[in-house]
Image (cartoon, helix red, strand yellow):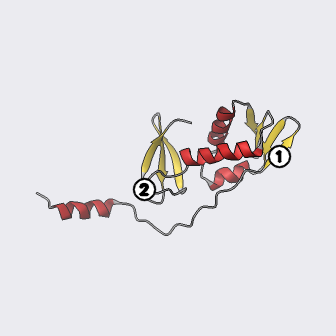
């Protein structure tokens, strides 16, 4: 029979090591209106910074806006209606809180992966895994 201290030592030896992490600088969306269309010029850079595929972020924004849109060749988002930059940044911040931020430690240093039908946020800072609603 193992002692409690031995079990704790074994648990701590299996935890991922926590290295020094730089706080992520969360970007704002660069929104440009052309006629009735709304373009987000830095969409690819923003998605790269938060480690999310542009299609996933696009799907979330378009679903919340109930609008149509598309990605061009350089992964910049075009929404086929006129949306204010304040509305887009508010929705983007909601996406960050729901699908990027670790609910355990609050770090934005995470990845989103799919296991079967379940989407999971895996934190690179603390190692926590949290299931989230499908995008």
Pair 1/2: label in front: 1
Viewer-proximal residue, 68 or 97? 97
Q: Residues within 10 Å of mark 1 (few under 14, many from 20)?
A: some
Q: Which residue is mark 2?
A: 127
Quadrant housing residue 7: bottom left
Quadrant housing residue 6: bottom left
Residue 75 visible, this angle: no
* Residue at the outermost left position: 1
Q: Is residue 56 above or below residue 6?
A: above
At which x and y percent is residue 44?
71, 49
Q: Which residue is mark 1?
A: 32
Of helix, strand and loop, which one carries label 1?
Answer: strand
Question: Along the polypeptide, which appears first: circle 1 or circle 2?
Answer: 1
At which x and y percent is residue 49?
64, 56
Residue 47 visible, this angle: yes
Q: Is residue 115 above or below residue 29?
A: above
């Amino acid at each position: 029979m193992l002692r409690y201290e031995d079990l704790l030592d074994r648990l701590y030896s299996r935890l991922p090591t926590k290295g020094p992490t730089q706080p992520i600088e969360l970007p704002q969306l660069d929104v440009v209106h052309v006629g009735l269309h709304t373009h987000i010029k830095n969409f690819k850079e923003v998605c790269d910074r938060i480690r999310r595929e542009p299609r996933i972020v696009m799907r979330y924004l378009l679903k919340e806006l109930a609008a149509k849109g598309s990605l061009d060749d350089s992964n910049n988002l075009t929404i086929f209606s006129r949306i204010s930059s304040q509305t887009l940044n508010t929705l983007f911040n909601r996406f960050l809180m729901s699908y990027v931020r670790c609910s355990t430690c609050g770090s934005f240093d995470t990845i989103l992966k799919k296991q079967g039908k379940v989407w999971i946020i895996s934190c690179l800072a603390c190692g926590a895994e949290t299931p989230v609603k499908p995008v």
